[in-house]
Image: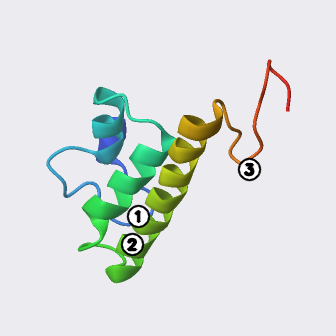
Amino acid sequence: MSINDNQVGGSHYKESKIQHWDFVWDNDLDYFQGQITKYVTRWKKKNGLEDLRKAEHFLQKYIALVEAVKTNGTVKANGTVKTNGTV
């Protein structure tokens, strides 16, 4: 039995052509990309519009972090800027 044959709490991933975690791994996605794609791919089978709003929320945070890095260099998730390895 494969680990993909067992899903805790529903069947919304088992019914997919590819398990979401395999998609994330195979495509080397980061945490935010994984969360966004998770909610977008499952919304019809699990929580409907709520999942699309969750994807949007993760995307908003991801955009804010990417913009902060582009503007300020390395940024911690809470928005503080790291310089020379310090906060």
Quarter occupied by residue 77: top right
- 85 vs 70, left or right, is right
Q: Residue at x 85, y 25 (%)?
A: 86
Residue at label 3?
78
> From mark 1 to mark 3, how far is it between C-alphas?
19 Å
**Residue 53's x, y, as percent?**
42, 74
Residue position for label 1: 55
Tag 3: amino acid? Asn
C-beta proximity under 8 Å, tags 3 and 2: no
| Label annotation for residue 51 | 2
In this view of the protein, can residue 8 be seen by the observer? yes
Is residue 61 found left or right of 29 in the rendered image? right
* Mark 2 burial class by Cα count in 10 Å: few <14, some 14-19, many 20+: many
Q: Quadrant of the N terminus?
A: top left
The x, y position of residue 52, in whole percent, is 35, 72
Foreground of the two, 30 or 69:
69
Residue 66 percent across, percent down from the top left: 51, 43
> What's the residue type where badge 1 is placed?
Ala
Lower sequence index among marks 3 and 2:
2
The reply, left or right, for residue 17 in relation to residue 59 is: left
- In the rendered structure, which amino acid carries the disc numbered 2? Asp
Residue lying at 31% horizontally and 42% vertically, measured from the top left = 4
Q: Nearer the viewer, residue 12 or 32?
A: 32
Judge left or right: residue 15 versus residue 68: left
